[in-house]
Amino acid sequence: MEKTAAEFKSLANDYRHHRIGGSMLIHADCLEWLGRIPANSLHGIVTDPPYGIKEYEFDQIEKRANGNGGIWRIPPAFDGATRSPLPRFTALNEKERAQLRQFFCEWAKAVTHALRPGGHVFIACNSFLCQLVYSALVEGGLEFRGQFIRLVRTLRGGDRPKNAEEEFPGVCSLPRGEYEPWGILRKPMLPGMKVSDCLRQFETGGLRRLQEDRPFPDLMESGRTPKAEREIADHPSLKPQALLRELVRAVLPLGKGIVCDPFMGSGSTVAAAEALGLACVGVEKYVDYFELAQKTIRPLSHLSVGRDQIGFGFAS
């Protein structure tokens, strides 16, 4: 614990920060922060970025709050349930896609500095942008190690052609989303180093197994974020604790070290780490979310997550 406290002090630097349990929240732009912290400080990253273009800019958030949409698709009620707004990634033009690629290339360079050799990154994406995002992360210095597929009915896609629904009732412009891809990437190990060497020297290099006879899988059936969690944390892309607790656990192969969420949002990744007794650093640029996370992390971490909520259970 003393070692973690000293490490946290070096990670806080001169940024506004707040300690919660065994974790720390930092108010900073993650690109700047990742580049300033000591090299090889982090063991793993689990994050769901806003993709740095439009959807969380003030005018777009205001339009979403007012029900006007903007880049957010405000969907109708479906089977009596109100569907959460989703960012319309298809609205990005070529210039914005180039900006997106450049952002993630630069982000990967900063991550490569901050991660220990062999440290893994779990990064949430979507089927429309994942090819662009993964290639940019590789260009920035990370190794692509595959995808973790979360089977979940996202309610994205499947719509008839806009303003021509009656003319083409049998057509959908995109397939209905039934899964959410998470890229799995890794900072390269040192030349000539095997995974076993990396585990001994850096406590990284692999993913934690579910149990001794059960490797960590790349496919999981997952429900949507439960209402109880959404009532605690008001964030448009809140991931379920059942999912995040599995990913946070997997990214620390020896069950120790520091996991980071550079796009903390309402703090759900930090809450997952707290629930498992793991150390986490959450970084958030927007002050409203930074302050919201201080209120939501403890209640989220105290929620009980049953085995029936996920495709596989926790390994004790």
Image: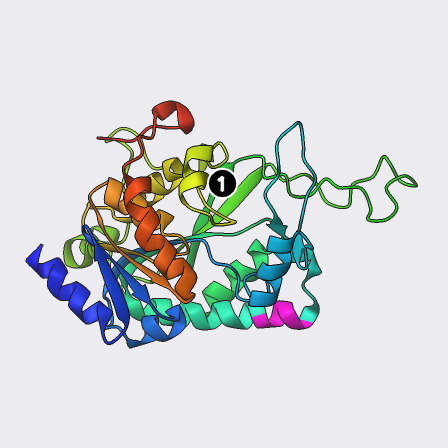
Helix, strand or loop under label 1: strand
Q: Residue at x 50, y 35 (%)?
A: 224
Q: Which secondary structure is most common in the magenta stretch?
A: helix
Q: Quadrant of the N terminus?
A: bottom left
**Left or right placement of residue 175 versus residue 193 in this view:** right
Residue 226 visible in this rendered orientation of the protein:
no
**Left or right placement of residue 226 versus residue 262 in this view:** right
Residue 5 percent location from the top left of the image: 12, 61
Q: Quadrant of the C terminus?
A: top left
Q: Residue at x 62, y 36 (%)?
A: 82
Q: Where does the magenta region start and end?
A: 95-99
Picture quarter containing residue 53? bottom right
Residue furthest to the front in view is 66
Could you say which is closer to the camera, residue 225 or residue 81?
A: 81
Residue 27 visible in this rendered orientation of the protein:
yes
Could you say which is closer to the camera, residue 266 or residue 109?
A: 266
Residue corresponding to mark 1: 149
Residue 288 percent location from the top left of the image: 42, 61
Residue 144 percent location from the top left of the image: 44, 56
Picture quarter containing residue 212? top left
- What is the three-letter code of the residue carrying label 1? Ile
Magenta stretch: residue 288 in it?
no
**Left or right placement of residue 74 versus residue 293 in this view:** right
Could you say which is closer to the camera, residue 176 or residue 216?
A: 176
